[in-house]
Image (cartoon, rainbow, N blue to C red):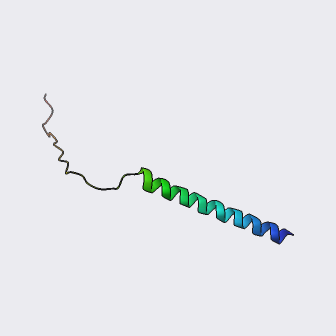
Amino acid sequence: RALLRGGVLACAALLLLWAAIFLYGSFYFSCLPPAALLRPVHFAFRCDPPAP
């Protein structure tokens, strides 16, 4: 009896884990943009000494 309950619990946990991984993967690939550099960005910094 306890072995059957443990097996059902393990199957339910595996099903829940599989569903979580599947839903995370589908969200990741559908909502997040690809990591690509569209155009180069050039930053300009001024290194002037502070005025007295």
Q: Which of 1 and 42 is in front in this view?
A: 1
Query: In which quarter of the view is residue 4 placed?
Result: bottom right
Q: In which quarter of the image is the C terminus?
A: top left
Q: In which quarter of the image is the N terminus?
A: bottom right
Seen in the picture, residue 36 relative to 1 is either above or below; the reply is above
Measuring from the top left, give residue 24's x and y in whole percent.
52, 56
Measuring from the top left, give residue 19's x and y in whole percent.
60, 59
Seen in the picture, residue 38 relative to 14 is either above or below; the reply is above
Residue under the image location 14 percent in, 39 percent down? 46
Query: In which quarter of the view is residue 34 placed?
Result: bottom left
**In this image, 27 relative to 5: left or right?**
left
Query: In which quarter of the view is residue 20 placed?
Result: bottom right
**In this image, 38 relative to 16: left or right?**
left
Residue under the image location 18 percent in, 45 percent down? 43
**In this image, 26 relative to 10: left or right?**
left
Total numbered labels: 0
Residue at the limit of the structure toward the right, as seen here: 1
**In this image, 29 relative to 12: left or right?**
left
Residue at the limit of the structure toward the bottom, as seen here: 3
Residue under the image location 76 percent in, 66 percent down? 8
Seen in the picture, residue 49 relative to 52 is either above or below; the reply is below
Residue under the image location 48 percent in, 53 percent down? 27
